[in-house]
Image: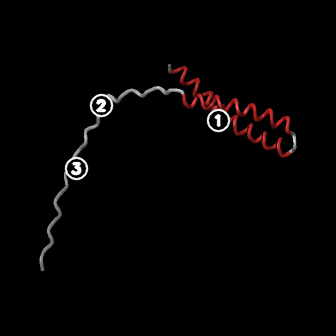
Amino acid sequence: MSAELDAKRTRLAVLERELPQLATRHDFAMSAFRFDEARELQRRIAVLERERAALVTAPRAVAPPPQTVPVPVRVQRRPLPRRRQR
């Protein structure tokens, strides 16, 4: 289970790096009026975004419950000294 989760995290990290790069290339292609290249990049972006969404919504491993439960500690306060009356 841990190896599978690590593989998903690694793939998600790769997608997080790759998507902005493809978006930048798409923007440059559009500004240079290379619409065929931009269309192909947009298709790749859509595929990677679907894969990213599937990885993000995949069930995560549940953390094991803590072994010990912390006990709240009550703090003892010292009484304030009384002021002398004049």
Q: CA distance from mark 2 to mark 1?
A: 37 Å
Residue at point 13%, 74% (across, down) = 84
Instruction: Give the residue pinned by disc 1.
Output: 16
**In the shown orientation, is residue 81 left or right of residue 49?**
left
The extreme bottom residue here reads 86
Q: Secondary structure at mark 1?
A: helix
Instruction: Kindly report which numbered mark, 1 or 3, lies closer to the viewer in this rendering.
Output: 1
Q: Residue at x 82, y 43 (%)?
A: 30
Q: SS of the residue at dot 2?
A: loop
Residue 68: which disc?
Answer: 2
Q: To which residue does mark 3 refer? A: 75
Dot 3 crowding, Cα within 10 Å, few <14, some 14–19, many 20+: few
Question: Where is residue 54 drawn, in percent x and y?
Answer: 59, 28
Q: Amino acid at mark 3?
A: Val
Q: Please identify the quarter of the rendering in which residue 12 is found.
A: top right
The x and y percentages for residue 20 are: 70, 39
